[in-house]
Every structure is written in C-alpha cells, then in structure tokens.
Image: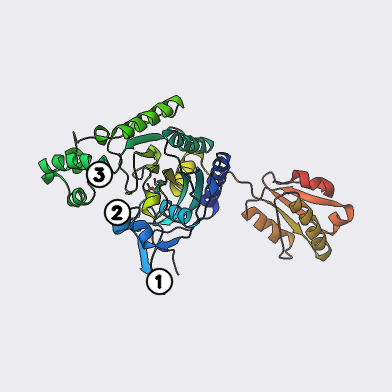
Amino acid sequence: MAQSVKGTRDLFGNDVRWFQHIEETARRVFQRHGYEEIRTPILEEIEVFKRSVGESSDIVHKEMYDFMDKGNRHVCMRPENTAGVVRAAIQHKLLINNDPRLLFYVGPQFRYERMQAGRYRQFWQIGAESFGVASPESEAESLLLLFEFLRELGLRHLQLSINSVGTAECRPAFHAAIRTFFEARQERFCADCHRRIQENPLRVLDCKVPGCQEALEGHPLIVDHLDEASRAHHERLKALLTAMDIPFVENPRLVRGLDYYTRTAFEVLSSDLGAQSALLGGGRYDGLVKQLGGPETPAFGWAIGLDRLAILMQALHGDAPVEAPAVLIPLGDAATLKAFELVRQWWAQGCRVQLETRNANLKKGMTSANRLGAKLALILGDGELEKGVIAAKDLAAGTQEEWPLEEVAERLPR
Ligand code: HAM
C-alpha cells in the first residue's frame, strides 16, 4: 500500500479544521490592514533562492527540493515565499515609486529537513510583506498586525525577540570583530562554524551546538557596530513597541537563517512547541528587491508556520470547533423528490444538511448519520409527506419530534 512521502502529511478532519480557522482569521485581519493576497507558483527558478536566501544558508546549501525539468531548466520547489513574492512583484511592476504595497500569502513550502514533531518537509506558511516604506513605523504596523492576528486566535504569552543585524555598510566592521573573537578560541567551535566564519560570520551566532553557544560567551555585539542611522532606527522601533504595549526582549545573537535581512530581525518563540520553538520569524530586507533585479525598494515582513500554529491551537483549545451537518433521510421515491426540493431551499438559506442519496432504509441511514457525528437526523417517509411534517431525531438525546416543514430551516445548523 502506498504511503505519503516522508516528511509530508495528509491533512483532514480536525487538522484541516484548525488550518481553515487560522487561514480565515488571517484573511480577515490582513484585509482589515490593507494587505492583499498574492499566490505565487510553488516552482521557481533556483536562482531566485540562491540570490536571496543565500548560497551559504542551510536552506539553499542542504535543504532544497531542486531538479532539472524536462526542458532542462534548473527549478526548485520553493523553500519559502518571500523571494517568490519579490520576483513576482518585480515581474508585474507592482513596486513603483516606493508606493506602499502590502501583500500576504498562504501556502506550502518545501525543505529537505530532518523530521521532528513540528518540523516537516512540506509545511505551510502564512506571511505578510510590506514594500516601499523604510521607517520603523512600518515595522511597528506589521508587528501590530501580527499580534492582532495571534490575539484573535487566542494565543498569548508568546515571546518576541528582536535584534538589528545592521546594513551592508556597517557589517564589515562587525565581521572583522567576530573573526578576531573567533580566532582566539577557534578550537572550541564546531566544523560548521569554521565554514560559517569564512562564508557568513554572522551565522556563527546562530549555531545550535551547546559548545559553540558557550564559546560565544562575551562575543562582540552587532548593535555596538551599527552605523548611526541603523542605531536610531533600532531605538525608534523599540520605543514604538513599548508605546504600543508589545513586550519584547532583545536577543543580540538573533541573526536568522536567511541572508537577506538588514537592520531589524525578529522571531517569536513558544515554549509550548518543544524543540521546534520558533513559531515565526521575519525582519527588514531593504536590499532584496534590487538584488533580484527590481527598483531600490525597502521592505519588511514575516512568515508564521501554519503547522506549528495548528499544534499550538490544539494544545490550547483542544479540537477545532465543529458542528456536523444534519442528515436528511428520505424513504421512498416520492419522499426523495420532496427531499431534493427541501434541501435546495435550505442550502439556499445557508443551512448545513447532508442528503442521504443511497435510497437507504431507515436503519442504514441512521447508522451512517451517527457515524458522521450528526446531532440531528431528519426523516421523511410517506406518512410525514402526507402530514407536511418531518420526523426530527435528536441523536444525542435519542428523542424524536415532528416539525412542520416550514419550521425546519430555522432549527438547522449553519
Ligand atoms: P523562516 O524562519 O525560515 O522564515 O520560516 C518561518 C516559519 O516557518 C518558522 O518560524 C516556522 O514556524 C516555519 N517553518 C520553517 N521551516 C519549517 C519546517 N520544516 N516545518 C514546519 N514549519 C517550518 C522565512 O521563511 C522568511 N521567508 C520569513 C520572512 C518573511 N521574512 C521576511 N518576510
């Protein structure tokens, strides 16, 4: 028997209900703030990610689902959506004159990672990207959007960590400082860190190996190497977050696993997620649009893991709220015709009713109504037809009543 591919999941029942609830909440909140949905292809040319996420990142280095297609193009199943959104926005000239442009997306991403609870090879992200505005105010707006979304889902006690990773201009000074620091204690760092210090020294700060984290004790801080404008930017963002009552901690080691960030970088962690504690991440990426061939355009955004959000929702709230539709069981040809007429009226009014179409007898109809988890079965036989009523059975209580046909709609689930 064929099984789903390792690292991928079939979503159904309660999982899919949580996904739907989260997506509906996201769409409602995002549209309120002026964000428009964008859907980009899962397949992109590999260059899109090499030139954005970065060749030295784990994502590009080890985790890409890439292959040559039948036309000999080197393509890849997107590992994240920011680069694709930027590619699309340039291609369709959505970024003109640095007018503010707010875009959001919901969709699957692919990374060849080691499987763990909360870590999959096909996973889902919801993301929000804000283009055209360089100010800390645009970051505050995006973070307000994020926390409004999380609050509407009933999630609290999440920790926002922020840092500034500076700009291309001030980074060389920091790189020099961290290299000097590294060289003085290089035997304490892992082999990967030795590669990182050559390719992208910032990444050393992000190493998860406990020995490396200890060796980093007293490391030079990026915030001490910021240029004046980046420092002022960082201070202003912190002041705005404080004024808006968004609690945060500063984490000087937060650098993120993607190369495109400039200035603000942030993550939100949840202790309820175990080892995979990162619920979301994002930051500013002022150089990316230009790097992918577009006009100079500042940008800021974040993406949240939908699979991880659903795990949190389940842990906090239990199963997703759901009421199964009522089941209408017609008995005999004449009743079946009448049943079609009735359900069409009820559906048009937004009622949720599932029609039994197997020409089933009462016992068979009732058995599957029970198995579907319906609370209400409606039975229409010749006797009911003659009297203009329906037999309504409350499946939890086991009681049965006769309802006049014209009263049924208002008693059905919606
Ligand atoms: P990221 O930190 O790589 O950022 O991913 C964001 C979120 O996606 C993570 O915090 C996590 O919840 C989820 N995620 C990542 N990998 C997996 C996985 N293997 N299984 C389950 N969930 C996962 C980005 O992707 C950036 N594009 C975010 C961004 C948007 N920055 C600016 N705009």
Q: Is residue 118 visible?
A: no
In the rendered image, residue 55, in percent from the top left (x then y), is placed at 29, 56
Q: What is the spatial separation of the Cα atoms under label 3 and label 1, in whole angstroms? A: 35 Å
Label 3 neighbour load within 10 Å: few <14, some 14-19, many 20+ = many
* Mark identifier at residue 69: 1
Under mark 3, the amino acid is Leu
In the rendered image, residue 326, in percent from the top left (x then y), is placed at 70, 51
Under mark 1, the amino acid is Asp
213 lies left or right of 398: left
Label 1 neighbour load within 10 Å: few <14, some 14-19, many 20+ = few
* Mark identifier at residue 204: none
Q: What is the spatial separation of the Cα atoms under label 2 and label 3, in whole angstroms? A: 13 Å
In the rendered image, residue 24, in percent from the top left (x then y), is placed at 57, 46
**Residue at the (63%, 54%) spot, across then down:** 372
88 lies left or right of 73: right
Whether residues under marks 2 and 3 lie with C-beta atoms below 8 angstroms apart, the answer is: no
- Sequence-first disc among 2 and 1: 2
Under mark 2, the amino acid is Asp
- Name the quadrant containing residue 34: top right
| Outermost right residue | 386
- Name the quadrant containing residue 382: bottom right
